[in-house]
Amino acid sequence: MSGDDGRPTREERPLERWAEARERRRAERRSERYAEPLRPLSYVLQRPTIGIDIGGTKVAGGVVDVDGRILERGRRETPDRSKSPQVVEDTIVDLVAELASNHDIAAVGIGAAGFVDAARSTVLFAPHLSWRNEPLREAMHQRLRLPVVVENDANAALWAEWRFGAGQGEDNLVIVNLGTGIGGSIMIGGELQRGKYGVAGEFGHMQVVPGGHRCECGNRGCWEQYASGNALVREARELAVAESPVAHGLLSRVGGDPSKLSGPIVAEAANDGDAAAIELFEEVGRWLGIGLANLAAAFDPGGFIIGGGVSEAGELLIGPARSAYRRQLTGRGFRPEATVVLARLGNEAGLIGAADLAREHTRLFRRRKTRDRRPRRARSAWQGRA
């Protein structure tokens, strides 16, 4: 059938009908896309974020505001290391759901003890959990529907101390966390240095005594075998087992059983003036200072921040460490010395840092998203020509 002018009607022109339908669909999609414009980035960055700190015995979480203050806390026991990664993920999701119920959350940051790849998405290895090449960021993003960033716990702690704690005002920092072992992180020019593969900062496994004490990593003489909580307890127990008279005070605190000696007990004895306990801390502090001098030769930072559970001993540890650092420093007397200070944020540094890094991640995420949502200008006839 044709029109009055003899030309085919629109219904008889299938190609034109298809083109019109296509344009209608495109218009509908554009209207949906721009119906609810993104809120300003400044608004988004003022919203609180959630930080998750995954340790060997607990999953701690907190809602953190833009100034690093924790508005609400939560905690779950870490599932047994033999359980599947799914169980750990379920624990994180449950904790985030609890914390987000009373807050308008912008993003989630997860700090994990272990190796995190340079893209901050995959946990390559976690010593306390069953994570091996685990794509944690993608799994959490799919379940939480929020921007997620995964970071090594020492990196998160250093970021928090730089932003809100002992490292404020200094952009070249090294943090050394003394716990069961030694963890660490490096900042140069205000940027965390993760290394090509994301696993920089494993200072605890620098070899300081060739052929020395066997380390859990399989090598001998690692730094953490001499300057860590494990080293402190090992030396205390060896002293007690040898039935040295100087260990009498320590043994009296544990009913004569050397196996019951622990870091907190030795710290308590040292604070009470026990000579053997003070000597043990001096020895750990000396090894700490030696390692700091080596790190100064490598990175030349403006400051060292000492964190972790062992650092709670304060001057019992940090005084001997500073003295040994000055004695061992390359070019001592002819170069500026980095400051050696105690961390200020304590056990919550990893949580706060993970949350704040999530905010930084959101900043980049939203800028990309805003750019992608902008209408593209018509392509010029001259564009793309040689």
Image (tube, rainbow, N blue to C red):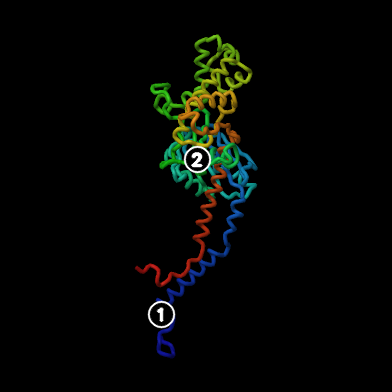
Q: Quadrant of residue 6?
A: bottom left
Q: Secondary structure at mark 2?
A: strand
- Disc 2/disc 1 C-alpha distance (Å): 66 Å
Q: Amino acid at mark 2?
A: Met
* Three-letter amino acid code of the residue under disc 1: Arg
Q: Which mark is residue 187?
A: 2
Residue at point 62% right, 39% down? Answer: 73
Disc number at residue 75?
Answer: none
Near mark 1 (Cα within 10 A), the count class, few <14, some 14-19 or many ≥20, is: few
Q: Residues within 10 Å of mark 2 (few under 14, many from 20)?
A: many
- Compared with 170, 38 (above or below) is below
Residue in view at x 53 percent, y 10 percent: 244
Across and down, in percent, residue 88 comes to 51, 38
Where residue 221 sits in the image (x, y, percent)?
42, 24
Query: For this rendering, which residue is in front, 188 or 385?
Result: 188
Residue 13, label in figure: 1
Q: Which of the pair 271/149 is nearer the observer?
A: 271
Q: Earlier in the sequence, mark 2 or mark 1?
A: 1
**Can I make out residue 130 in this image?**
no
| Res. 37 image quadrant | bottom right
Note whether residue 226 is visible.
yes
Q: Nearer the viewer, residue 101 or 123?
A: 123
SS under mark 1: loop
Please identify the quadrant where the C terminus is shown: bottom left
